[in-house]
Image: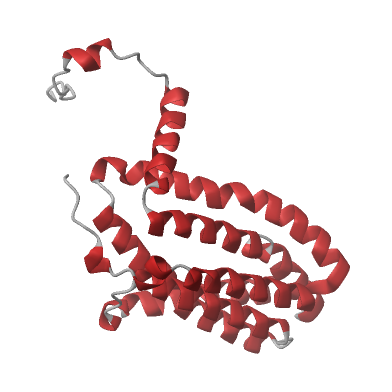
Amino acid sequence: RLPRLVPEQPEQTLAQTDAPTLTGGQRAWQDLRDGFSYLKNQRVLWILLWLNLLIQLALGPFMLVYIVVNNNWFGGGYNTLALCEVSFFIGVVACSAMFEKFRVTRPGLAFIIGVAFIGITIIFMGGSKNVWAFAAWNVVCGLAFPFIQLPMAAYIQKLVPQNFQGRVNAAMTMTGMGVIPVAIGLGGLLLAKIGAANMLYAMGAGMSVAGLLGLADRQFRTVRTDDAPVPNR
């Protein structure tokens, strides 16, 4: 017979006992507000939040464009659509596996360069009506993606106290995911007007511009991972 397991509960202080109890939904919203409040007091992360919003606006319609490109350029086969999708992840996995060798110390600058570079690869996709050329640009795009994610993730983990990690990530994820339906709706209308190639040009240019906007802030472009103070855990 297995022993009965009882969750360990920390002793509550009098202030904690007297505090109003929040329901699950109320706690979620409170955590989200706490995350935004923390981000507002961290300049690098606040700028990252808004840059990420612009990037999601530019990239939100990508799956719609993939489907139209596959149907109009590559014959509409499932295999060609899968090739376009898988090729990106091949680049991501390959670069992630050897990323430690690059020793990136400036997460803001890596983010700027990575985003701008991916935008350029998307522009080249607009002129690649051969499925293998299109897939090759997806691989190159995937190779640049870890430079956007990994250095900044390391900076956030070092900067943000452990009890705020979830709240900060929730605020940033909510902002990025929340704008995607708007981007898809607007992107679908624009795609019908200008076509897949011009849509890729517009998305790539929009993403590159969004990334390069980070150069306007000195603290964002010069911040180093070592600059982040180790928070009290």
Q: How is the image coloured?
A: secondary structure
Q: Residue at x 72, y 68 (%)?
A: 65
Q: Residue at x 67, y 64 (%)?
A: 63
Q: Residue at x 54, y 48 (%)?
A: 175
Residue 195: image quadrant is bottom right
Residue 155: image quadrant is bottom left
- Give how far across and how far down residue 91 sits, in percent: 46, 79
Taking the image as shown, residue 186 lies to the left or right of residue 179, namely: right
Viewport quadrant of the N terminus: top left
Residue 100: image quadrant is bottom left
- Give how far across and how far down residue 57 sits, in percent: 64, 59
Q: Residue at x 58, y 63 (%)?
A: 55
Taking depth in this image into account, of 2 and 138 the one nearest to the observer is 138
Taking the image as shown, residue 206 lies to the left or right of residue 76, namely: left
- Give how far across and how far down residue 117 sits, in percent: 53, 81
Taking depth in this image into account, of 222 and 161 the one nearest to the observer is 222
Which residue is at the far top? 18
Above/below status of 201 relative to 18: below
Which residue is at the far right? 193
Q: Is residue 79 visible?
A: no
Taking depth in this image into account, of 191 and 221 the one nearest to the observer is 221
